[in-house]
Each structure stands twice: as C-alpha cells, then as structure tokens.
Image (tube, rainbow, N blue to C red):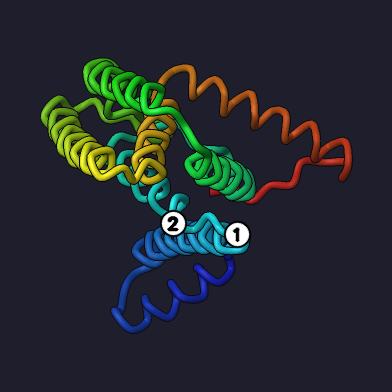
Amino acid sequence: MQQLSKTLAVILGEKLKADQEQIEIFAYSLEVLLGTVLEIFSIIFLAFLMNIEATTTVCLLVFSSIRFFGGGVHSSTYLKCLFTGNILLLSLGKLATLPISQGLLNSMCLFALLLGIYALIRWIPAGTEKKVITDEPTRLKQKKKVSLLLVFWFVATGLFLKYQVDAYALAIILGIMSSLFLISPLGYGAIKTLDKSINKFLILFFGKEVKIDV
C-alpha cells in the first residue's frame, strides 16, 4: 500500500508539476485514503458474508462520522487498525441483530445521550500524540459539528424506535457509544493495552513485531 501510494503520488506530481515536498504530502494522503478504503471494503465484505451487512453499515456510518469530527485514539499501525476495526464493527453489527427488550433499548439510548453530552464538554475534539487541537475556535467548531451529528443520529434513533425497527436503532446507539468510548481516556488506555498485546503475539509467533506504520 505504501509503495502504491508513492507510485501514484509521483505520477500525480508529474501531472501537476509539483515539488518533492508536495509529492510526499500526496503520498501520505493517498496512503491514508487507500488504507481507509481497504478497511471499509473489508468490513462490508465480511459483514455480507455474515449476513449482517445492514446493521454493520449503520454502525459504520455512525461510528466513522463521529470519529471524523470528534477525533480519538488510533492503533499504532495499519495492520492493527484493520484488525481492531473489523473486529469491533462486525461485533457491533452482530450485536445489533440480537433481540433486546424495549426497556433496555430505551435505557441504552438515554445512556448514550448522557455520554454524548459529557464527551462534548470534556473530551471532544480528542487528539493524538501527533496531532492535538489546541486552538479554541477550532475546538468549538468541532464540538458544534459533533453536536449536530449526535442530534441527527438521536432523531434517527427515535424514528426507528417509533416504527419498531429496533435493530437499526440499536445499531445507531452502539455506533455512538463505541465512537465516544474511543474518544474517552478509557478508550485510549484500552487501545494502548491492545497494541501491546498484539505486539507480544507477533513477537511470540514471528520472532519480531510486524510493522506497517502510518
């Protein structure tokens, strides 16, 4: 993927008559884009094989939209990101298909709403070690965008509950809760712990850590 990105960046740079620095920016951007496309394709494809494509797609839309504007923790390599992203979203898609009582569903919706409000006040936008948003006007804009997204998704949840499409309502709630979890300090700690566990597994079976760095 990295080599393909560099090749495409060089071709694009020649077409646009870009300098070396711009070509490197193209290469990085293409690598991120290709990695994202690969992850989305793999999730949808596996969900199709598992017959949970509808709920998984809803979870993916909710999860990715909030994460895009809200930020949050990322795995240290593409390989780990691909692995954790697939496991997480396929699990959420499967959970959304399970029968659940109306009372529990309403309680989860209320909890997700309260968590969303708290996250907006305390955590959003969440940064990474490489990128932390400190500019207050920019932070405020990101908070407003996530607020609008949460309003949209909770309205959609209300409509699904009204028409008794519980699977989609649950999929939205799970997508919201999981995205907010990865924005929280607890989510940062969980991903770091998972990274270390995967490293130990790779060292145990391959004798070294397999790196596919961003």
> Percent position (x, y) of residue 23?
39, 67
| Callout in the foreground (1, 2) | 2
In the rendered image, the vertical position of residue 194 relative to residue 38, given as above or below = above
Residue to which mark 1 is pinned: 46
Circle number at residue 89 = none
Quarter of the image containing the N terminus? Answer: bottom right
Q: Residue at x 50, y 37 (%)?
A: 99
Horizontally, is 132 left or right of 96 in the view? Answer: left
Going from N to C along the chain, the mark reached first, 1 or 2, is 1
Residue 164 appears in which quarter of the rendering? top left
Give amino acid for label 2: Ala
> Percent position (x, y) of residue 3?
58, 68
Q: Residue at x 58, y 50 (%)?
A: 82
> Percent position (x, y) of residue 61?
35, 50
Cα–Cα span, label 1 and label 2: 12 Å
Horizontally, is 124 left or right of 184 in the view? Answer: left
Q: Residue at x 34, y 28 (%)?
A: 126
Q: Residues within 10 Å of mark 1 (few under 14, many from 20)?
A: some
> Percent position (x, y) of residue 171?
40, 42
Q: Residues within 10 Å of mark 2 (few under 14, many from 20)?
A: some
Circle number at residue 54 = 2
